[in-house]
Image (cartoon, helix red, strand yellow):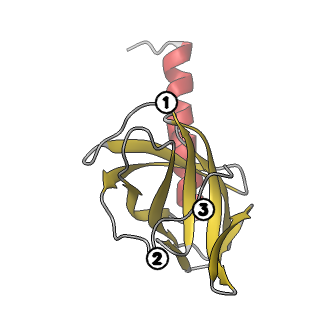
Amino acid sequence: MKLSATMLAGFLCVMLSQQLWADEGALEVKDPWIRAAPPVVKVLAAYMTIENNSDKGLSVVGAESPLFERIEIHNTVIEEGLARMLRQHRIDLAPRGSIAFSPGGYHFMLLGRKESIEKGDRVEMTLILGNGDRLPFEALVRSGMEMPQGEMDHSHH
């Protein structure tokens, strides 16, 4: 069987990317989900648990999705009784550590929704690591717990 240069290059890319993740130690995204909202809402939130199963520290510096203009990492903090979201430029994961992105805490702000998504849909997303590696995954669109004391104001986005 004769391999074309394109087929060989594709095969090598797949093998090298699998090796990178084997070397990095299998960063895992568990139970990724996006809170369902009416189509007029352009800012959504994504939640998940990210586990670092390797023996070295890793950092998440961002995420992307073809369905959103941009994605930012935020953390909700309570200051003087008011909830504020603070943008995070990096989340460090200790060796064998994990971090939960959940309502009222760390979350991914999905800004500028490009098309309608509904409960039950799956959304392609990609985590971007500090070393340049990327980890694709799918997040399920579902309803979630209501935010305490109503929804947060995202009008500044």
For the point 43% across and 12% down, the residue is: 2
Mark 3 or mark 2: name the one nearer the start of the chain. 3
Disc 3, SS: helix
- 129 displayed left or right of 135: right
What amino acid is at disc 1? Phe
Asked if disc 1 and disc 2 are in contact, CB closer than 8 Å, the reply is no
Q: CA–CA distance between discs 3 and 2? A: 41 Å
**Mark 1 residue crowding within 10 angstroms, few (<14) / some (14–19) / many (20+):** few
Residue at label 1? 11
Q: Is residue 56 visible?
A: no
What amino acid is at disc 2? Gln
For the point 68% across and 73% down, the residue is: 57
Rendered position, 26 above or below 10: below
- 157 displayed left or right of 64: right
Q: Can residue 17 be seen in this view?
A: yes
Rendered position, 122 above or below 47: above
Residue 24 numbered mark, or none: 3
